[in-house]
Image (spheres, rainbow, N blue to C red):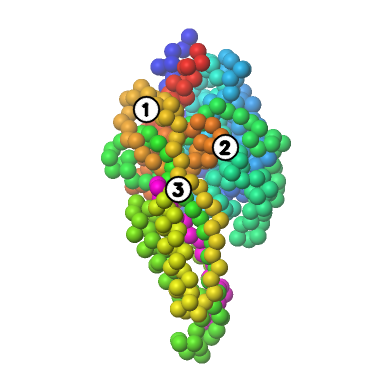
């Protein structure tokens, strides 16, 4: 009988899987462009489904394309213990954001099967659809539907910047599954992820014991002025929407600087008509505010929403602004956090307790079941960047701690 202690994952096999799936949407600069419910997303989903079925797992797909691969345990009266993350990426994403969590879970599953180790509870791997929210806002869209934050119809209605709808694209790639969202249950979820920040590397720690996720809010802003000739329109008579947007973006940066460790960012901007000799008449941009403390986030929101109208008035511009997403700060489940601590110490890895700056599916899944996360370092803390990088050993450490934590949690059902 295999003892728990010699259940050692195979870091090379995990690394090979990471490099193989990096081909689905590979970019020239060594990153991945695998936007949610794109053809590249379909290819990696097909690969994931085939790999899980080869292991004998039952693969189910719900009506948001969330994928659930389950291996039975000794006791069918217990709900599965889940290990989940996401396979979609940013437009210029890296090889590890999200995918490490899904493939680290696959490696843990492969190890259990190789060693003939039967868990008490079933074990499940989850691929959550559209964690990134880059193509279809907001982020964590389908883990949000699973947790009851959004309705399926809200998700289906979301449009990308080309006017395509999420529901149509999900159907087009063949992943509008039969299972009602939320109907496939599990009793806990562990999510392995790269930190996407510099702390673990700076402190030479291997494992982040994640205690929660900071609050996040997204907004959309449209500034309207008047298109006019750049040669014939005197400076004092212009209604320059891009000048207004530029001053607003500076003001938003100031809101972040005035509320550290909060962050304030503008990431997406569309300038119309975007012609070199036309004074811009309309600018659309997005705003992303985050802070660990909701009360401070309220103040950041108030400051930002007070600053924009002043700028619009000064420059005789019209302003349209609205909040499209609010994900409150989340604390993870203490007993699952304890399993991660045990799992890391059992493997002999140094640890550091921390909250997550980035959003994750775990932030919403924590509303549906006890949840926590495990971080590993990434080079220079860089992520959402084609240069995103981590090492075979760090990926292996994360997957090993994930397996150890799941088995630690499972032991109480013996
Ligand atoms: O926005 C986020 O924090 C996540 O990467 N979707
Ligand atoms: Mn992610
Ligand atoms: Mn991401």
Circle 1 is placed at which residue position? 341
Lower position in the chain sequence, tag 1 or tag 3? 3
Q: Nearer the viewer, mark 1 or mark 2?
A: 1
Rendered image quadrant of residue 320: bottom right
Residue shown at 49% from the left, 40% from the top = 363
Whole-percent x and y of residue 231? 49, 88
- 287 part of magenta stretch: yes
Whole-percent x and y of residue 261? 34, 51
Q: Residues within 10 Å of mark 1 (few under 14, many from 20)?
A: many
Residue shown at 64% from the left, 48% from the top = 155
Helix, strand or loop at disc 3?
strand
Magenta range is 272-293
Judge whether 33 appears above or below 100 on screen: below
Label 1, label 2: how far apart the Cα atoms are: 24 Å
Q: Nearer the viewer, mark 3 or mark 2?
A: 3
Whole-percent x and y of residue 72? 60, 20
Residue shown at 61% from the left, 29% from the top = 185
Is residue 46 among what the camera can see?
no
């Amino acid at each position: 009988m295999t003892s728990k202690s010699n259940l050692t994952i195979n870091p090379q096999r995990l690394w090979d899987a990471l490099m193989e799936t990096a081909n689905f949407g590979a970019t020239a600069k060594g990153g991945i462009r695998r936007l949610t419910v794109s053809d590249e997303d379909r290819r990696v989903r097909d690969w994931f489904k085939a790999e899980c079925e080869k292991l004998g797992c039952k693969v189910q797909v719900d009506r948001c394309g969330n994928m659930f691969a389950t291996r039975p345990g000794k006791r069918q009266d217990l709900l599965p213990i889940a290990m989940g993350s996401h396979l979609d990426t940013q437009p210029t994403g890296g090889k590890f954001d999200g995918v490490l969590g899904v493939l680290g879970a696959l490696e843990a599953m492969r190890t259990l099967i190789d060693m003939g180790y039967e868990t008490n509870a079933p074990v499940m791997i989850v691929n959550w659809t559209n964690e990134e929210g880059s193509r279809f806002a907001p982020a964590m869209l389908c883990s949000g539907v699973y947790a009851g934050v959004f309705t399926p119809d809200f998700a289906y209605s979301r449009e990308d910047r080309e006017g395509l709808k999420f529901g149509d694209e999900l159907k087009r790639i063949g992943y509008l599954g039969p299972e009602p969202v939320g109907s496939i249950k599990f009793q806990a979820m562990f999510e392995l992820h790269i930190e996407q920040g510099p702390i673990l590397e700076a402190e030479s720690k291997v494992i982040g014991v994640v205690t929660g996720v900071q609050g996040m809010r997204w907004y959309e802003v449209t500034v309207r002025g008047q298109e006019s000739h750049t040669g014939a329109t005197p400076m004092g008579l212009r209604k320059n929407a891009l000048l207004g947007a530029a001053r607003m973006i500076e003001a938003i940066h100031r809101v972040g600087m005035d509320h550290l460790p909060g962050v304030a960012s503008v990431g997406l901007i569309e300038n119309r008509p975007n012609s070199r000799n036309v004074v811009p008449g309309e600018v659309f941009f997005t705003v992303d505010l985050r802070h660990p403390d909701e009360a401070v986030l309220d103040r950041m929101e108030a400051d930002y929403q007070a600053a924009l109208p002043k700028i619009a008035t000064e420059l005789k511009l019209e302003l349209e602004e609205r909040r499209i997403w609010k994900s409150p700060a989340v604390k993870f489940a203490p007993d699952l956090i304890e399993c991660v601590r045990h799992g890391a110490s059992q493997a002999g890895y140094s640890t550091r307790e921390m909250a997550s700056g980035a959003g994750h599916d775990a932030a919403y899944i924590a509303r549906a079941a006890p949840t926590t996360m495990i971080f590993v370092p990434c080079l220079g803390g860089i992520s959402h960047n084609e240069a995103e990088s981590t090492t075979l050993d760090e990926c292996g450490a994360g997957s090993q701690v994930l397996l150890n934590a799941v088995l630690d949690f499972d032991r109480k059902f013996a």
